[in-house]
Amino acid sequence: MQNIFSGKGSRLLSVLFLFLLIFNSCKKADTVGLEVLPEEDRLQGEHTDTITVWAHTLREDSLSTTKTTFHILGSHNDPIFGISKASIYTQFILEKIDPDFGTNATVDSVVLSLAYAGYYAEIMKLAGEQSFSVHRVLEDMGDSTTYYSDDSLDYHKLPLGTFSGLIDTRKNVIISGDTLLPQMRIKLNNSFGNELINSTSLTSDESFLNDFKGFYITPTTQHLLTGQGSLIYINPASPYTKMTMYYHNSDTTAQQSFNFVVKSNTVRFNNFTHDYSGAFDVASQLADSTLGNERLYLQPMQGLKAKITFPHLNNLVANGQQIAINKAELIFPIADGTTSRLSPASRLVVVKKGTDGNDKVLDDNVYESADFVGGYYNSTKLEYAFNIPRHIQGLLKDTTADKSIYLRVAGASVSGNRVVINGTGNTDKPLKLRLTYTILE
């Protein structure tokens, strides 16, 4: 029989003994709680989810709404957030330069059509009838101007046309026997049509816009009850978004039409307003930042954002201790009972303030993928989660840096989806920062 303590067997036993010695010397002395962690987290070092977090709701800054993919139109009385209103300013230009309307042209009607791209909140009967009006803009709309959500232009107070009725963004419309995609159709008055057909400024878009500067389309529904109204998404790129003048002449018995359209060079933007006077919790928190302990309110359309602060983060590197952040997970649970009839925002984003006071993306967004950083709505866990280790590591490296970030709804200029999230004082599922890190010295 071969002696296992001699030759190759002896060397093998020595390697095994050395491995066990190294393993035991590197093993953490305190492993309490690690048995409940995922395997990948056990290998990454220390863990804490008791970092102090302060949070409260703020009014959102204005945002650019110039030539966005979609525009929002309508008003809605949200049970939690109060009344929101979205209006559109837009130019229309000539479908064809210097049109010939024929002999003895006479206007039959002028119709403004707006192609639907969806909606937020209720439509049809539960939303109630909704009203809109179209007004003539009295100011030039600048080609190179960036318009923001709180910008407005002077307009003629007497409307060119109005609409009242139930909105159905899913129902096709039939016009002269043709089936068209869902759209809002607002009839404008014939005196305006006569001005169009007799105009001498149809020789160029520039000449036309000098006389017909643009249009203001706004909701006018009064006394919305809680839950009534809706926010309608309008597609400006659709061929069904246009102003059509129907006319006849003595050259033919068939009715003719001419379109004024939206093109890539057409100036257009959204205006948003919010009334929180009937939203007690929101109004109270805006007046007193200490009230964000239980809930935070996030709203697009220049509505609401949250300020998130880590006031005692520097304690992690007290006395010169050096650590490497492996994970920095910000967890934002959705407040119970706030999404039963109104779906939450599909994604949130976090930003920081630069030294110039402007918003800047976090380093994690620059160097990592969107999936790594996160912020997407998790319909299973009913929460949003971010992973921002680079940003937290940077705050620990520069202990004088601002320890605040700002949480807001993504796509805020083209979406109405809002959300309520739990604050740090929620006893069930609080907002929290969960760190996984390695102590270097």
Image: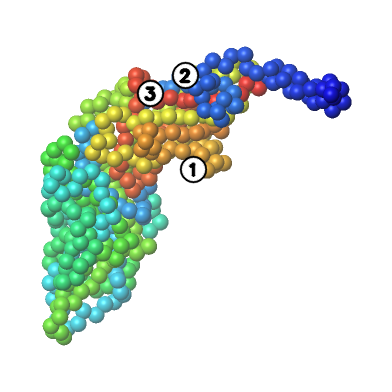
Disc 2 from disc 3: Cα separation: 11 Å
Quickly name the residue at label 2: 50
Q: Is residue 352 above or below residue 115?
A: above
Q: Residue furthest right?
A: 7
Position of the C terminus, as image quadrant, is top right
Which numbered dot is residue 370? Answer: 1
- Please say which color scheme the image uses: rainbow
Residue located at (30% from left, 52% from top): 71
Disc 1 from disc 3: Cα separation: 24 Å
Q: Is residue 370 above or below residue 252?
A: above
Q: Nearer the viewer, residue 16 or 107?
A: 16
Q: Nearer the viewer, residue 437 or 364?
A: 437
Which numbered dot is residue 430? Answer: 3
Residue 212 x/y as whole percent: 25, 63
Instruction: Answer whether labels 1 and 3 touch (C-beta < 8 Å).
Output: no
Position of the N terminus, as image quadrant, is top right
Q: Secondary structure at mark 3?
A: loop
Residue located at (25% from left, 56% from top): 116
